[in-house]
Image: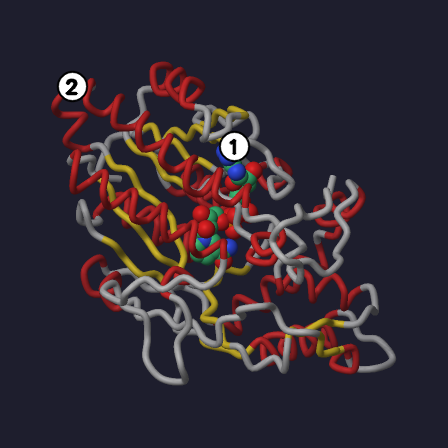
Amino acid sequence: MRLNNPTIFVTGGAGFIGSAVIRHLLRDTQARVVNIDKLTYAANLDSLTPACGHPRYAFVQQCICDGAGLRTLFDKYQPDAVMNLAAESHVDRSIDGPNEFVQTNVVGTFTLLQETLRYWRAIAPRKRENFRFLHISTDEVFGSLGDEGLFTETTAYAPSSPYSATKASSDHLVRAWHETYDLPTVVTNCSNNYGPYHFPEKLIPHIIIKGLAGEPLPIYGDGSNIRDWLYVEDHARALSLVLERGKVGGTYNIGGRNERTNLRVVESICDLLDQLVPKEHPYRRLISFVEDRPGHDHRYAIDASKLELELGWRPQETFESGIEKTVRWYVDEKRWWRAILEKGYEATRVGLSSGLTRPSPVQ
Ligand code: NAD
């Protein structure tokens, strides 16, 4: 890394991408990692078993909306960087209950920025110069594409869902803290991630788990919506590269050039399940089309050439290699996801309400 044995705050480190980032930092770098996570329903410390007891790892249960709590952690650990992954992340839940999304994604990012700024201003000049605040965001802030074109770093923001609107707000706050207060920030906007340790409410794990149970495989609308898929470990590697070498004040799009319709993704999963866990009938027979998501964006597609050209990043997985690894992992690691189901998470449909009610509790 650019820094010698840096101490890195990873917020949201018990989530899907945060845990991949922590596993990567501990395995492939000399960084010390402090995982700051509130432990919402989406968190899972079982995703961090390789980190448990690791001499360069510490976990703190802490909400990023609590400035005083964050201040104590900055004083105690004196970090060299913050990677902000703490968020409410599920679009369907944001439709039913946007409040939590505004709290964590907007107020939480604001609070974290304020405490980072306070700390950053007080540290020694050399440490201040090397310090970075990396904010992890999504391509959903750009809204929906038609059949042509790609999102670049200069695409105008046009978020459609409460989730993407709160992420867009947080991106703007981060940029403003750089422009106004000189805080050394970098923002990344990534396409849809998939891979091991993904919470069962998201499309790919949801379909694998339903398929293994022999239950209908729900596809929103006609399945023609297009997402651009990236294997989570490729995202983790990209984030560590951007943290190390990204230009201060800049933004980087991250994506693997893997556009697929939702229907094609589900069909790929079915075909892999046919090979790995064959049943009497092909899994494709379980596919069932259900009412579309309100405001469902048609297409997302990322142009990652800035990251490729400036920093030399390349994904290591194709969609085919990544989805095979993923399906195999869910087939082999049933204990991980069954524990979530046993805690009371019900894989029922959410995201069709008026936005004035809160989603039913899941734990
Ligand atoms: P996730 O829902 O799996 O994990 C989020 C984590 O944040 C959880 O561990 C949760 O406990 C924690 N958290 C939530 N509120 C918190 C709070 N107030 N204080 C502290 N911790 C809190 O999310 P993910 O899929 O890992 O996404 C991580 C980040 O990456 C998010 O910012 C998301 O917007 C962004 N992102 C996700 C994707 C994707 O495909 N999943 C793609 C691009 C960008």
Question: Along the polypeptide, which appears first: circle 2 or circle 1?
Answer: 1
Residue tagged 1? 37
Seen at 69% across and 66% down, the residue is 207
Is residue 25 placed above or below 355 in the rendered structure? above
Residue 289 in the image: x percent, y percent?
71, 78
- Graded by Cα atoms within 10 Å as few (under 14), some (14 to 19) or many (20 or more), the crowding at tag 2 reads few
- Image-quadrant location for residue 290: bottom right
Left or right of 274 on screen, residue 45: left
Q: Which residue shows up at 53% across the image and 69% down it?
A: 295
The outermost residue toward the left is 125
Looking at the rendered structure, the kind of residue marked 2 is Ala
- Whether residue 233 is visible to the viewer of this picture, yes or no, is no
Q: Quick one: 67 or 19, which is closer to the camera?
A: 67
**Horizontal and vertical percent for residue 144?**
42, 72
Which quarter shows the C terminus? top right
Residue 147 screen position, x and y as percent: 41, 85
Residue shown at the point (58%, 56%) measured from the top left: 95
- How many discs appear? 2
Q: Is residue 207 above or below residue 183?
A: below
Circle 2 SS class: loop
